[in-house]
Image (cartoon, coloured by chain):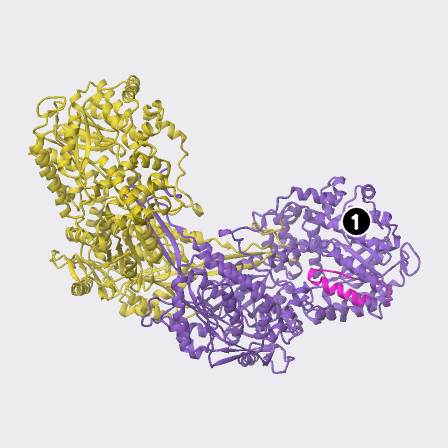
Chain colours: A purple, B yellow
Amino acid sequence: MAIDASALEPKIIARGKEFFQSIAGEAPSIFNKGWWTGKVMDWAMQNEDFKVQMFRFVDVLPYLTTSESLSRHIEEYFGDKDANIPDVLKWGAGKTGFGGGLVAMVLNKAIRSNIEGMARQFIIGEKASEAVKGIRQLRKDGFGFIIDLLGEAPLNEKECDEYYDGYMEILNAIQAECKKWDALDATGDLDWGTSPKVNVAVKPSAFFSQAKPVDLEGSVEGIYRRVEPIYRKIKEMGGFMCIDVEQLKYREMTIELYKRLRSAPEHRDYPHLGIVYQCYLKSTESDVAELLSWARKENLPISIRLVKGAYWDSETVLAKQNGWDIPVWTIKAESDMAHERISRMILQNHDICHFACASHNIRTISNVIETAKALNVPDSRYEFQVLYGMAEPVRKGLRNVAKRVRLYCPYGDLIPGMAYLVRRLLENTANESFLRQSFAEGAELERLLENPEATYKRELAAKKAPAGRKMGPAGYPVFTNEPGVDFTIPAARAGMKNALEKVRRDFGKTYPLIIGGKEVKTSDTLNSYNPANPSEIVGAVCQAGVKETQDALALARKAYLEWRDVEPLERAKVLFKAASIMRRDTYELSALQVLEVGKQWDQAYGDIGEAIDFLEYYGREMIRLGSPRRMGNAPGEMNQYFYQGKGVTAVIGPWNFPLAISAGMCAAAIVCGNAVVYKPSGLSSVVGYGLARIFKEAGLPDGVFSYLPGRGSVMGDALVEHPDVSVIAFTGSMEVGLRIQEKAAKVQPGQVQCKKVIAEMGGKNAIIIDDDADLDEAITGVLYSAFAFQGQKCSACSRVIVLDPIYDRFVSRLAEAAKSIKIGPSEDPSNAMGPVVDKAAQASIMKYVDLACSEGKVLVKRTDIPADGGCYVPLTIVENITKSMRIAQEEVFGPVLAIMRAKNIDEALDIANSTRFALTGAIYSRSPKHLEKARKEFRVGNLYLNKGSTGAMVERHAFGGFNMSGVGSKSGGPDYLLQFMDPRLVSENTIRRGFAPVEEGDDWVE
Amino acid sequence: MAIDASALEPKIIARGKEFFQSIAGEAPSIFNKGWWTGKVMDWAMQNEDFKVQMFRFVDVLPYLTTSESLSRHIEEYFGDKDANIPDVLKWGAGKTGFGGGLVAMVLNKAIRSNIEGMARQFIIGEKASEAVKGIRQLRKDGFGFIIDLLGEAPLNEKECDEYYDGYMEILNAIQAECKKWDALDATGDLDWGTSPKVNVAVKPSAFFSQAKPVDLEGSVEGIYRRVEPIYRKIKEMGGFMCIDVEQLKYREMTIELYKRLRSAPEHRDYPHLGIVYQCYLKSTESDVAELLSWARKENLPISIRLVKGAYWDSETVLAKQNGWDIPVWTIKAESDMAHERISRMILQNHDICHFACASHNIRTISNVIETAKALNVPDSRYEFQVLYGMAEPVRKGLRNVAKRVRLYCPYGDLIPGMAYLVRRLLENTANESFLRQSFAEGAELERLLENPEATYKRELAAKKAPAGRKMGPAGYPVFTNEPGVDFTIPAARAGMKNALEKVRRDFGKTYPLIIGGKEVKTSDTLNSYNPANPSEIVGAVCQAGVKETQDALALARKAYLEWRDVEPLERAKVLFKAASIMRRDTYELSALQVLEVGKQWDQAYGDIGEAIDFLEYYGREMIRLGSPRRMGNAPGEMNQYFYQGKGVTAVIGPWNFPLAISAGMCAAAIVCGNAVVYKPSGLSSVVGYGLARIFKEAGLPDGVFSYLPGRGSVMGDALVEHPDVSVIAFTGSMEVGLRIQEKAAKVQPGQVQCKKVIAEMGGKNAIIIDDDADLDEAITGVLYSAFAFQGQKCSACSRVIVLDPIYDRFVSRLAEAAKSIKIGPSEDPSNAMGPVVDKAAQASIMKYVDLACSEGKVLVKRTDIPADGGCYVPLTIVENITKSMRIAQEEVFGPVLAIMRAKNIDEALDIANSTRFALTGAIYSRSPKHLEKARKEFRVGNLYLNKGSTGAMVERHAFGGFNMSGVGSKSGGPDYLLQFMDPRLVSENTIRRGFAPVEEGDDWVE
């Protein structure tokens, strides 16, 4: 049924004005400046810095369980003399400042209780009995409810079970009571004659700790397993269940879950199942259309709640950090427009779709009311929802006009409650908040009720044209990282699947050496096998001997003499071309790593992205460094500083980032004007061959890159000691690195240059868990850092140093989470941990597993691993580890994690710095002082604050350590290329016969 | 006698207008566009690039003795398709371009003859007979003359003798003729009744090849020796001699020469001796006043020629390059004002001073005429001079109005003539040229005749306020080099003299070690002696053993742990303070080097300047590098890249730049946050002690710098191999450098960091002499590069590669020049070469002298050296040296120079690159293509085009080589500090609960 928009618009405005009229003079309690909350809100709206500090403080508050800890944090967050702190926080502190003395202690307690009170405004109860009591009151006031159980993000299956139990508890409590409830504005079992009295919201992600987009099927199954019984229970109570949608990453599985549950044979006949859609997502309009058509096809009545969306910041930041298209509308009015369009679509389908409009925006609400009217939608087919504790005038107005108003009621512990509180505070203090504009700023009615299309047009016109991608030298856009893989996109999943099949079809081929552009076969070959199934031969790789090594070096030397003089820009272009080839072949290159070294899908894909990043970054870096720099500006002389490639570079690559690190070292050498002889690891030589193929296709002259797999014992020394080798770029173990360094330092007969060794070696990386760490994030970060790709990263976390006060809580959650990790072939994306790279690694790690278990107390030792001949080792976590133990000092390069206990932050830092490595490290803390301290004193190459220790991105996290972790500068960083070049300076005396042409930049007389 | 300026001014204007009126419609021939010269001048005035190419081409032309060479240069200078070349040069070249074919050959010849013709316009004759003929014609036209013998800068005493002979030849030719001349406008022996008919100009610098400001007395004596007989000859002819002044550096000696000659008993009575003053020099006004008062005191009539000055560009550039105050007026009108002021002063003293006004500027001339009138100066007391071949209308006008007009007539070979031509062309094409403005641009008379004071005020008002010194980070001015010593300033000479006495008073003291801030005495001491007189003990220096070494390292380690965390700016401030102490003590520090290692005054002073430069530069570099750099700009994460000092640094210093290089290495280490243990060379440990003293005075915390002289055989390995040493910064021989590198690469028990070795080692540096090189400059450059400080620099030139066509000419001039060098104690500034550093060096160099003499043919072997026990060795030059000879491959580190012959530039470059060193190099060439080729293919760390191979300045000539010349990046360059630090990256996840504060620079949604 079509609508006459021009007739509708004045009605919406009139309705809105009437609505405002009906609540004239009222304001939401959170803006009431007579109260502590209102004062804080007011200050936060005026002062961005305070807002950041305040919201962060609210976030950490539940963790501040001792009075000392509370005082310290108050001091750290608000103690800055220069900071703009409102009197409401200073109130009574007088000149004594925060944190000290008895008076201060009392005040600090007051602050805590004020904030907790603020949280309670939005939460209907911490216990089931409180919640039921609250609901009762609401119903008395004429409002329906929908109950939502707050919860920390479940990191393991036990927590999911507990969360499930939590739901059962509140359902039971309600069940015991709800029989007694009268219907609201109706009689009988249903409120308003059509809606169940009991309404329950569930967050699907909370019911399965291992859910992830890449594994749609497994995720849906995992969630279904726990949600279905809850739904059954609700049905039993005659209630309504609504499936919430949170982050975009759960969108697809949530929709799928809804469909399965809704169409399950035993539930098909029960209509009270709803789903939420977020209007800020660009995809929502088509998603809703799709669901409506599904409903028609299945002939199943459905229910949709439409919200604007509460994760705008994080969705945007996530997209920006990953280089993805922004999935949400970036102008608020666009979301409002979407809400109007989508709600009309739903109302047009009211026969099959019940509609819940969840908004505090009076324009949005008026639009729904008038649209429903225009479409003759029966009252029973739509209702309104607002959040508990917010927007009291709106709910009152709605009650007046629409009767069917339901309050969304979070219930549960204050710890997750604080997260919820922060979200609500953010929402209400945002510049674009309707409530803020309406009730705190008193904007004009016309503006508040304006058609969002008009708002949008006006704001669009006022915006500057987007700047577009920033340009760097030589007309290339400045470097940005290759977008990470987004497995919420079905094509990405299909791409990997197809590529895996394709790669497997190529199994068993023989790979020749490539020397000076020519394929060279040798009789000696080495098989590279699939670590998940060693009987699968990925490829047979020819192995260079001493002769082939000498040949390759001689041709490299020859190629170098030409290549070094090729213009930097031309050299860079070869890298850019190689990057575009990798981009084209990403899936195939990724799939090969899944099968040759056992990487999980995302890990493998990330490696290709990093390889591309190295090519793009080093290309640009060379363009930057390639322009001679004028030194000084005295007239009569022109001094130019520039660089020259050092010579033949031996690149000895690792197997763990088989494309990225090799491509990085090779590309750096090449773009600097060197010729490379590349020896890949024997465990990833087929990936290495791919690099050779790519450089060839990119048009690199023959001889500038030779592919020379070989046994270290046979040709390693020949490569390192050859007098023509000027640079050795190595990534691998400390032992090998030090050996190379020592050999390279001895000058050989005929050698005319001191060899430069660039070695990235091991790590024994620690993550510190401060006593105020956000454990949801810390545990996720530790698990990922320690066990992704089986811990086979030099950046992997192998020590966790936990502060005493939080030790038990952290360790028990961590252990449970580690037990929930699914282990199996990396080819299957449902597995989060796979086999280690080969049998030798397996044997070596097993020794460390035994060592760990003997030195420490076993916390987790996952023996439930495939026993099919794959190279699996048990995921192992031990505690009671101290500094001097071997497991605290030696690099394992496998999924073995040592937990160490520290009294305080100083001891934690001391332990962290106590190895001879200094590669990566991380700290989870919400103490500004401790973060600052770590920044200075946690002395590693890459330190992460409130992030895991792995996953460094080119440029953004220029990577590499010092001490025994590395010789040389950070890869993917601004100083890296310098190592491959010698600086030269040419100084020209431009005076002839006293006559010096004046050059731009001359310091000539003024 | 005072003048009424207000009355004078209108008369000057009127006189000027009348003057212009009298020459209406006439123009100087050089601006006549009907002629080739006029066309070229016109084009050069329109097109700056062409002007540069044209003048440079004119400069090189005399060297293009073959048709091939001529064609090639025409092609290189004017063959660029895109260049703006006037038709007059392309004329007839058509589409065949330059350089090829018979037609082109003919045209090229035409170009040569046109340019030579242009030169002849300004030169009265190439031979004496031509000159006399020309003079005769001039006199017939009513003009007097002053003859000047053109000459290349004499580089040796033989050339001075030849120049002297040249004067005698022309004087004899004139003598034979002048008797026959009638007086101009008079009768008798004198022209105009008062002036000698014969007038001769002499350039004092041309009569003594070793003249230098630092040796005023020696220089004056040397010049006097040859000028006096010429003067006597002129007297004999009843002539007039005028002593010209050229560059500022000869100013003082020229005035002194004039006074001596004028007041010499046998010449006191002869009044016809004049001297020239340049009005553009700021010092001239007081110089003239001083001479006038000297004349009165001595009661000797004198004569002054006043010019504006012809070396404005080079004086300015020289000052700018050395960081001196600019000695010349920077606004043209200021020179004009000075001319008016000074000419008035002279005219006021006409009773004792005869005046010659040499100017083409009609305002200037009119001022002199009217001032003389106002002062009632008799005609006989002043005359006018103009240049031969220029400004014909001016000379005609002058002839009309003043009669007494003398033409300045250069005479001689075209080679020096071309240099003269370039100067004249420059003068005439300068924007501010009076002739250009008057006759080429037809400026308004009012403007041309304007009082220069008014011009000055107008121009000053139109100028932007001077920008002042450019500021860098942290409020410090950007780095500029410490001004070089200016020995034209008497105080500088006195400063050195006094300091030498002071240093000598301290001889024989004992110097302790300084460990962790405490003086430590040892029983083992080593004497440091004066190499010019080994019996003089400069100091007895305590020698560290293994225990002292370990103590120093332990204290350094302790100090490092604190120092690394001191803010970069604070660390930099210590360097700045140390620099200011050095600045205060420059003379004393310099004098110590003269006596401890035998440096010439300027060499020693330069070393202190370089030390100061290192401190100032590295301080600023650390401030630059000390600000953490944000990496990436994704919202929600804040990544900072910064640096941390590596640890304990062993600095092993050389003796040849005993303060500069040591200060540089130590300062770099210190400012980066490392602690230094400094082992100076045993040959310069007293200088090294000074460094310790300076760092202490600058407030460096104890232990951050320890002074640890010691015998390498006793404590060298203990220092290098100690596990606590993280960095070794070494400058010295290749052998020691490689040994250190090898030892450092072996990891010692307890060692937690790979040692970084930064080694600057040897060189076998070549200078290429192209067949079109400016030999005046090339020979000066080679001599200085090879023999200053006795060739004991790693940058010293030890090979000269000479292109065949120029070989004989170069070698003979070089050998003569080398024979002219004065050898003796460096303490005496008249000596240009002194003793080598010690007896061991003497013995080692003597072996190389013998080797050189046996491998090659001896060209120079100076056995005329002091035989007083000083460590002298013969300055040695050998020829017939080929690539593979030892003397062509091994570093001598002494005054031994090998000459090698090359067929062409390619062979020259091949020879140049044929050693395993790659430190410095130079080429003298005026071929744009060859310079470009050298820029690319002469592969050394520091390459100099048309400069010598030594004298690198911090920053401007960031210093250091590759291959076996060095491990590490250029000292005094932008990458140097990076070697002393480890980069660290801290990445903070700033999102909490989905809320990320927006930071400046975030790539947020647009």
Q: In this view, does A487 lie above or below A640?
A: below
Reading the image, the residue beneath label 1 is A392
Q: Position of residue A15 (x, y in %)?
A: 83, 43
Q: Position of residue B67 (x, y in %)?
A: 26, 49
Position of B167 with respect to A313 (left or right) is: left
The quarter of the picture where residue B355 lies is top left
Q: Which residue lies furthest to the front in this view?
A: B102
Residue type (three-letter) at the residue carrying disc 1: Glu
Position of A92 with respect to B306 (left or right) is: right
Q: Residue furthest right?
A: A187
Front-most of residues B746 and B423: B423
Position of A847 with respect to A565 (left or right) is: right
Q: Position of residue A356 (x, y in %)?
A: 81, 55
As helix, strand or loop, the secondary structure at mark 1 comes to helix
Position of A580 with respect to B656 (left or right) is: right
Front-most of residues A904 and B606: B606
Q: What stretch is highlighted in magenta?
A: A236-262
Q: Residues within 10 Å of mark 1 (few under 14, many from 20)?
A: some
How many labels, in total? 1
Split into 4 quadrants, where in the image is the C terminus of chain A? Answer: top left
The quarter of the picture where residue B232 lies is top left
Q: Can residue B986 be seen in this view?
A: yes
Task: Kindly identify which chain the residue marked by label 1 belongs to.
Answer: A
Q: Where is residue A12 in the image (x, y as percent from the top left)?
A: 81, 44
Front-most of residues A434 and A366: A366
Q: Residue furthest top?
A: B7
**Is residue A247 on the magenta stretch?**
yes
Q: In this view, does B381 lie above or below B847?
A: above
**Is residue A970 on the magenta stretch?**
no
Q: Can residue A383 be seen in this view?
A: no
Front-most of residues A326 and A612: A612
